[in-house]
Amino acid sequence: MEAVTVAAGEFAGRTAILAGGATLIGRAIAAAFAAAGANVVIADIDAEGGALAVRELGDRALFLPTDVTVDADIDACIAAAAERFGGIDYLVNVTTSYLDNGLETARADWLRALDIAVVGAAIFAQRAAPHLIARKGAIVNFSSISAHRAQAGRFVYPAAKAAVAQLTRSQALEFARHGVRVNAVAPAWTWSNVIGMVSGGDRAKADRAAAPFHMAGRIADAEEVARAVLFLCSDAASFVMGAELPVDGGYLALGPEQRDDAIAALAG
Ligand SMILES: NC(=O)c1ccc[n+]([C@@H]2O[C@H](COP(=O)([O-])OP(=O)(O)OC[C@H]3O[C@@H](n4cnc5c(N)ncnc54)[C@H](O)[C@@H]3O)[C@@H](O)[C@H]2O)c1
């Protein structure tokens, strides 16, 4: 029997590209890869966040300004990453857009958001494929609990995340014969730039707001999502393909009868 945990050293000398890696969640993933001995390439339009990640991680991290809606940027990023680190083992597509005006969303915003979240991930995988195949690597995409539930006023983001979940299954089948595994994580509310901004930087307030619909009674730390990403990239996940792993504190398992009052109403 082989070990069932992430083997010590298995990420040493490997290289991960994190598209959208300059954000708080992306930087937590970068830190987890770097701590495990991997090289990390942050591909993002956010130069400030990218610079911060490189400052946090040192020599093994590289920021490459990359717009995932521009093919030439993706190609340049992949070429520079392969040249600097000698190959590419993992691609993590963190990039998203929160452009969403529900029913009123303009066509241009629909197309822009889908370009960033879905098409960007598809083209990045397409262009990185020869490198990932050469290393028998892995891809992790970012879905969300939003892919599975109606949320007030939101049309574009949930549709984009549902498309990413299906893209993951299609890519998994295509890449499996080349020895590359493709999976997704589906986080629930996670301490992130957006939650930090909306809560005014108040973590306790975010936890309180999320408690009624997360079994965990709180939001996730970015590091908890990062650990799931590393698991999916690791050999411990060797038979996990086309999966969407909830990292959601029980959000998706909950239904309307989560409290005792339903039975109480019936009995009363
Ligand atoms: N924040 C949450 O609670 C939460 C919950 C579930 C899922 N997620 C998913 O986690 C991931 C990260 O979420 P977040 O809240 O940190 O998002 P975010 O908006 O803070 O980060 C997205 C990153 O993508 C980058 N980006 C945007 N457009 C780009 C482009 N054209 N080219 C390259 N990079 C671009 C941004 O600069 C940013 O660094 C997303 O895929 C999101 O759907 C987040």
Image (spheres, rainbow, N blue to C red):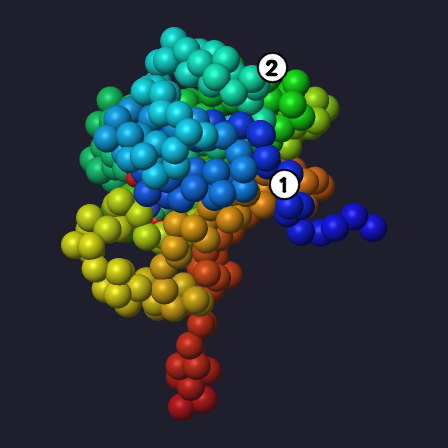
Q: Secondary structure at mark 2?
A: helix
Which dot marks residue 130? 2
Q: Is residue 36 left or right of residue 262?
A: right
| Residue 221 seen | yes
Q: Residue furthest bottom?
A: 268
Front residue of this view, candidates 222 and 166: 222
> What's the residue type where badge 1 is placed?
Gly
Q: Quadrant of the C terminus?
A: bottom left
> What is the number of callouts on the image?
2
197 is higher (above) or lower (below) than 203? above
Say which residue appears at 39% left-offset and 50% top-offset.
222
Q: Residues within 10 Å of mark 1 (few under 14, many from 20)?
A: few
Amino acid on which disc 2 is placed:
Pro
Q: Quadrant of ligand 1?
A: top left
Give the Cα distance between marks 2 and 1. Answer: 24 Å
Q: Please report the residue visible at 57 percent of the width from the left and 19 percent of the height from the top.
A: 87
Callout 1 secondary element:
loop
At horizontal 65% and vertical 23% (from top left) the residue drawn is 135
**Farthest top residue?**
72
Which numbered marker is on residue 9? 1
Q: Quadrant of residue 72?
A: top left
Residue 141 position within the rendered picture, expressed as x and y whole percent measured from the top left = 49, 35
Going 66% across and 18% down the picture, which residue do you hit? 134
